[in-house]
Amino acid sequence: MVDWTHERYAAAAVTQIERMAGTVEGADFTTQVPTCPGWDLRQLVTHTGGVHRWAALMVGRLAAERFDRAALEAGFAGLADEEFAGWLREGAGLLDEALTAHPGDAPMWAWGGDRHVRFWSRRQLHETVVHHADAALALGVTPDIPEDVAVDGVEEFLDVLPYAGRWRPEVRELTGDGETISWRTGSGAAWLITLGPEGFAYERSAARASATLHADTAAELLLLIWRRGELERQRMDGETKLLRWWADHSMI
């Protein structure tokens, strides 16, 4: 099991940003991004690099409240296509400098439950992983997500999901009376989600459940739960209606 420290998250985030920069270097930025309907590659990269800079700015100042990201991203509209890869790499440096300047347990604003700098090193890693996959899929490249990163990404999704109810009201409906959902992978990682009256809880477990979703790898599962894959193409057992209901209510 990987020991995911704040420092390791920060280093992995930089690696993923640099890999994304390599994927989009020399690309046609008018290419549509099917996994982000309505966006082309230019919009995807501008958003992703903007988020890196937004997070770096807040972490650097240990912000006690949210900074306006839209205003920051508006300043990147004039970038030329040939500048984007270098601009992403520059953002990696800014983010790394901010994240490594503070201990992971330094308090600051975060939209999730862990209101510390370490929230942002973890969040920026997985933000980049998913958007790098978006870029790769748009360009006809198979996403290559390390399995240890994907396993943590699945759990990060479950950790932040309850807080997404602020802008996705349907997330608040992820409740139940003890129904269980199992996510299982061919690589051995497995999770059990239990729905309760106040929300859901999860644990690493291959225990039997009301409904089971199978994926070949944690990387494939990560893309599925972020709606970058087709649920209906996966093997599902038990109460498959429950799996579809979860998918419909967990879109963030």
Image (tube, grey):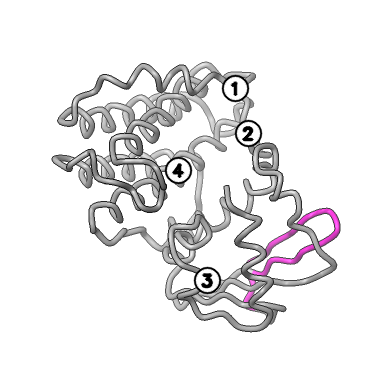
Identify residue for label 2: 111
Label 1 with label 2: CB-CB less than 8 Å: yes
Is the C-beta separation of discs 1 and 4 under 8 Å? Answer: no
State which mark lies toward you, 3 or 4. 4
Which residue is painted at 33% across and 21% down in the image?
76
Say which residue label 4 marks.
127
Distance, label 1 to label 4, CA atoms, is 17 Å
Label 3 vs label 1, nearer the camera: 1
Element under disc 2: loop
Front residue of 134/158: it is 134
Circle nearer the N terminus (1, 4): 1
Instruction: Please name the residue that numbered disc 1 is placed on.
Output: 66
Q: Residue at x 31, y 43 (%)?
A: 15
- How far apart, in angstroms, are the residues tagged by discs 4 and 2? 14 Å
x then y, percent, for residue 36: 41, 47
Provide the residue span drawn in magenta.
192-206
CB atoms at circles 3 and 2 under 8 Å apart? no
Q: Main secondary structure of the magenta part?
A: strand
Does residue 204 belong to the magenta stretch? yes
Which of the numbered marks, if any, corresponds to residue 114? Answer: none
Question: What residue is disc 3 on?
Answer: 189
